[in-house]
Image (tube, rainbow, N blue to C red):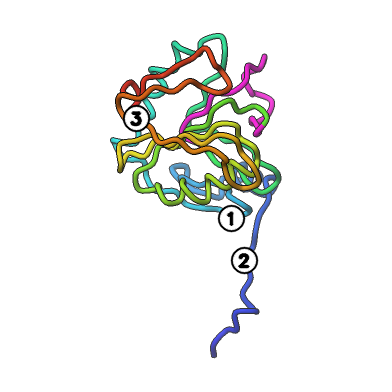
Amino acid sequence: MAIATTDVRKHLTDINEWQRLGEANIFPPDSRLELIEGEILEMAPIGCNHSGHVIRLTHFLAALVFGKAILSVQNPLQLGDLSEPEPDFMLLKPNDDFYCSHHPNADDVLLLIEVADSSLSFDQNQKLHLYARYSIPEYWLMNLNDSCVEVYRQPHGDCYGEKTTLRIGDTVTLSQLEQISINIADIL
């Protein structure tokens, strides 16, 4: 007997249920899961090239932003009641308790970076729209497949008004920390 598609429904979850599932150890400890728009998504394992670029970003930007921003690497970001992605890298506004009492939200983000190879399409579409919808002011997509950095600024609705593609030889100044300029060769 075939099931009519109107009889099939997704069970969407919210942040509260998501956090209770985590506290109850429902998922294996090595799971790579994110809550995106109410859906629990399994992310691909992190490969050497991906992790190496995250380490490089952390190493390079730590000295540049010391005292101006807090680095967050592959940690949760609460976006509304239905999403809690774990971006590869974020620069956050300074916070006295270093976000020990709550996860950062969109208002805390100065810069968000996703490093993408196998996740490129997902990061260029679903994550881009999610970050724009929550007004993340600056989203960088380190596109390892095409050896470039896609810089998205001016969020409006669920898209960004400005996209710039940068390659080795180019430099970029952070929109939220204007005194900081980065040579793309240092991070790519």
Amino acid type, label 2: Lys
Q: Quadrant of the C terminus?
A: top left
Amino acid type, label 1: Glu
Query: Which residue position is annotated with label 3?
Result: 53
- The residues bearing labels 2 and 3 have C-alpha atoms spaced at a distance of 35 Å
Magenta extent: 87-106
Label 1–label 2 contact, CB within 8 A: yes
In this rendering, the answer to whether 173 lies above or below 116 is above
- The residues bearing labels 1 and 3 have C-alpha atoms spaced at a distance of 28 Å
Query: Which residue position is annotated with label 1?
Result: 39
Using the rendered view, name the quadrant where residue 167 is placed.
Answer: top left
Instruction: Residue at 34%, 44% (x, y): give it.
Output: 117
Residue 149, given in percent of the width and then of the height, sits at 39, 34
Q: Residues within 10 Å of mark 3 (few under 14, many from 20)?
A: some
Q: Earlier in the sequence, mark 1 or mark 2?
A: 2
Q: Residues within 10 Å of mark 1 (few under 14, many from 20)?
A: some
Residue 170 part of the magenta segment? no
Using the rendered view, name the quadrant where residue 114 is placed.
Answer: top left
Query: Which residue position is annotated with label 2?
Result: 10
